[in-house]
Amino acid sequence: MVAVKMPRKSVLTAFLATLFWMLFITAAAGQAGEPPSSLQSQVLARVEVPGLLQDLNLPVYADLTDAAGKYYALVIAPRTRLETAGVSFQTLDAYSPGTRYLLALARRPGARRNAAASVKILHDDGRRILVRYAPGLDELLADLGFALRLLGEKPMTLAIPTLRPRVLEFLLTPDPGVSSMIAAVTQETVNSYISGLSGETPVMVEGSAYTITNRHTRSGTPLEKASRYVFEQLQGAGLNTSLHPWTYASYANRNVVGELTGAKLPDEIVLLTAHLDDLPLNGLAPGADDNASGCAALLTAAGIMGRHRFQRTIRFVFFTGEEQGLLGSERYAEAVAGENIVAVLNLDMIGYDSANGPTQRLHTRKPANPGYQADLEIAATFQEVVNTYGLAGSLQPIITAEGESESDHSSFWDRGFAAVFAIEDDWDDFNPDYHSSGDKLQNLNLPYCTAQVKATVGTVAHLAGPIATAVSPTPTPWQILLLSRQRPADTFHGPPNFLVN
Ligand SMILES: [Zn+2]
């Protein structure tokens, strides 16, 4: 028995010893490695950016400029990582997984003071306040006159893919096709779209007349009708039209998308975007400037460009949920993250101009952000179009590289896409009726708005690459001189007065 038992005991002992060692080794390995991040104390911090943003080598959720002109980033990371990164930082909140933050840019005088009376503010940089997201807080802040941006669930992508083609490659010479598209933009068309979307006049939707009194994301039927109206208009323009449904917290809505498939480079996509939703929630919400103006630009452009062909695909995208923190565009940008979006032009408020001056803003990222150069190409294309097609007398676009992020373009910036935010002069001539029932068509400057629609059509056409028309552009004397020098003398058959032009 003993002789039989002993081996059994040995086997048991060996088994237990092996189990012990396995547990010990696992535990030791666990101690040697990094503890799981959930066990570390994570914080939301303001980190000063002395040089290039990517040199921080930290998970950045926003990069901003405060009222004093200081460039800083919002970072969520373990406190120990910030301490060892050698950066100057200020802890704003103890972060727990699942927490979301709202950035709110004050657009109305006194908005920050009014918010401080009722909301717990984590940070106030003199222009923006930062708060923890909570249901209902978005509506409260939007009503106080803030533009909102819900910070992403993931850090921003801080690298521009190197394979992305340069957008300027098609901007070679003035194009007669583009010239005719720009000429086809009329103030009457722009006026009619803003009037219909802002409820001044009824629109035809689903075969009957309807007056759109409100386009708030929670308005129900009114925004539903506005979305259908936009959808039908895009269909009428000959575009492939679709809906992109999204949800966030208690919000559920959809974006409307119209697509003109590119004839040569269909996988390279240019986006022209605007938000369709507006404020306030209750009563009349005409939102003529914010943002029937931008939507009118998209509808006018789609109507004209739908009759032309382009090398790249153009998508006209109408977002909802913008006023609650860019909800619709955030979900859309997430859905197209794997596509080759070469450029995004976002229009938000392009109709107010009390100064009757031609100033317009093209917002790009900061030069210290790796996305700046790509944004600049879009903005430069816009400026080039204004100068090339004779719009400079009525429009003066100023490139403003401050990374102003409180509109739908920043959902694309977050994912490393090139994007520009076109707006009226929001720095020196802001619309006093912002987010109120007074945001009406009668307060807009239609010639100014029409000039922006013309410049938009030209810019998108050049970004997408117009397909050459039968009429060739008239060469400048300088181009002719160059051509004549390149051409061998014996094949030159031009008329004697060819250079005298
Ligand atoms: Zn807006």
Image: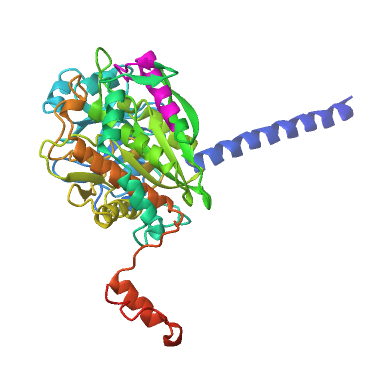
Q: Is residue 128 magenta?
A: no
Q: Position of residue 484 (x, y in %)?
A: 37, 80
The image quarter in which residue 498 lies: bottom left
- Residue at image coords 34%, 43%: 345
Residue 428 lies left or right of residue 205; in this view the side is left
Give the image location of residue 6, x and y in percent: 83, 30
Quarter containing the N terminus: top right
Q: Residue, x 34% and y 65% (percent of image)?
A: 474
The image quadrant that residue 470 belongs to is bottom left
Residue 276 position in % (x across, y down): 34, 27
Q: Nearer the viewer, residue 249 or 80?
A: 249
233 magenta-colored: yes
**What range is drawn magenta here?**
209-234
Q: Residue at x 38, y 30 (%)?
A: 319
Q: Is residue 406 left or right of residue 258?
A: left
- Spot occupied by residue 353 in the image (x, y as percentages of width and height): 15, 37
